[in-house]
Image (cartoon, rainbow, N blue to C red):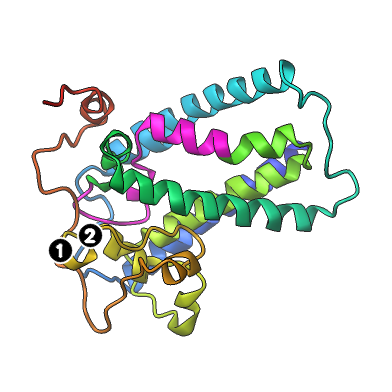
Amino acid sequence: MSGSYQFISFCIIVLGALLIIYGERKFPYVKGQKLFRKGFFEDFVSYTVIQSYIAGLIIASIINSLQKYSIFRDVSFFTNTAIWIQCILFFLIHDFYIYWFHRLQHKLPILWRIHEAHHSSHEVDWLSGSRSHIIEILVNQTVEFAPIILLGAAPEVALFKGTIDAVWGMYIHSNIDVKSGKLQYVFNGPEMHRWHHANEEEAIDKNFSTKLAIWDWIFGTAYFPPNKQPIKYGLTKNYPQTFIGQLFHVFRYRQ
């Protein structure tokens, strides 16, 4: 895969971020929320830049090892399959997986430990979605990208998935007052996902979908009240707000 594709991916992500930031300033969901809100630089520097880079190196090493020492070496199941079909296939499979894994994270205490950092931000915006514990990142992105490599899909598929992940992740957490209408029954957006981060009792353990909202509607976990907004977000308990604090909090002793 040429470097030009990677450069295009980078440009799409940056352009997407700028457009979303503009949307937050022009059409805010929560009015008065600042761009450089509390925790902004922690999320940008520690999570988006440093952790993402380190996690990427680890995941690449894991996948390379699996490819080198497994039955999948030199496997190519998609030689005669169009790239756009590969992209759709892996998009749907991973989105279905992430719905159920996300749901399990809210149900099983051991999985909630690696997920609660993602819910710790008290102001939800385009950048707060980057706040995820590195163990969660390693699990989810290895599951996402390993099959693409090991089954011999085109390298462009992984780049496509990574680009969509980045832009869609910023979008669903954005502080934009979006009105999707009936499209919200198919495609997930901030209208529903902001409720997932809300503290309201009726919204707890709802809206687990990432990109396709259909999973929540099909499996009965959708929550989308008309003409109502969440009052507050984040964890109510005494949870650390620093990157280092959240990194080690997962290993705390539990009675």
Q: Residue furthest right?
A: 80
Vertical side of 211 occupied by 149: above or below:
above
The quadrant of the rendering that contains the N terminus is top right
What type is the residue that disc 2 sits on? Ile
Question: Where is mark 1, residue-wise?
Answer: 201
Left or right: 91 as drawn, with respect to 24: right
Residue at left 66%, top 44%? Answer: 159
Pointer 1 local density, CA inside 10 Å: few below 14, some 14–19, many at least 20 = few
Left or right: 9 as drawn, with respect to 180: right
Q: Are marks 1 and 2 in contact (CB under 8 Å)?
A: yes
Q: Could you tell me residue 237's position as x and y percent? A: 9, 43
- Please name whichever residue, 134 or 143, is drawn nearer the observer in this view of the structure: 143
Residue at left 37%, top 55%? Answer: 126
The quadrant of the rendering that contains the C terminus is top left
Q: Secondary structure at mark 1?
A: helix
Residue stretch in magenta: 121-143
Residue 97 visible (yes or no)? yes
The span from disc 1 to disc 2 (Cα, nearest Å) is 6 Å
Q: Could you tell me residue 62's position as x and y percent? A: 59, 22
Pointer 2 local density, CA inside 10 Å: few below 14, some 14–19, many at least 20 = some
Q: Secondary structure at mark 2?
A: loop
Left or right: 169 as drawn, with respect to 94: left
Which dot marks residue 110? none
Magenta stretch: residue 70 in it?
no
Q: Quadrant of residue 85?
A: bottom right
Q: Quadrant of residue 203?
A: bottom left
Residue at left 8%, top 38%? Answer: 238
Q: Could you tell me residue 95's position as x and y percent? A: 54, 54
Residue at left 45%, top 54%? Answer: 99
Which dot marks residue 204? 2
What type is the residue that disc 1 sits on? Glu
Residue 14 visible (yes or no)? no
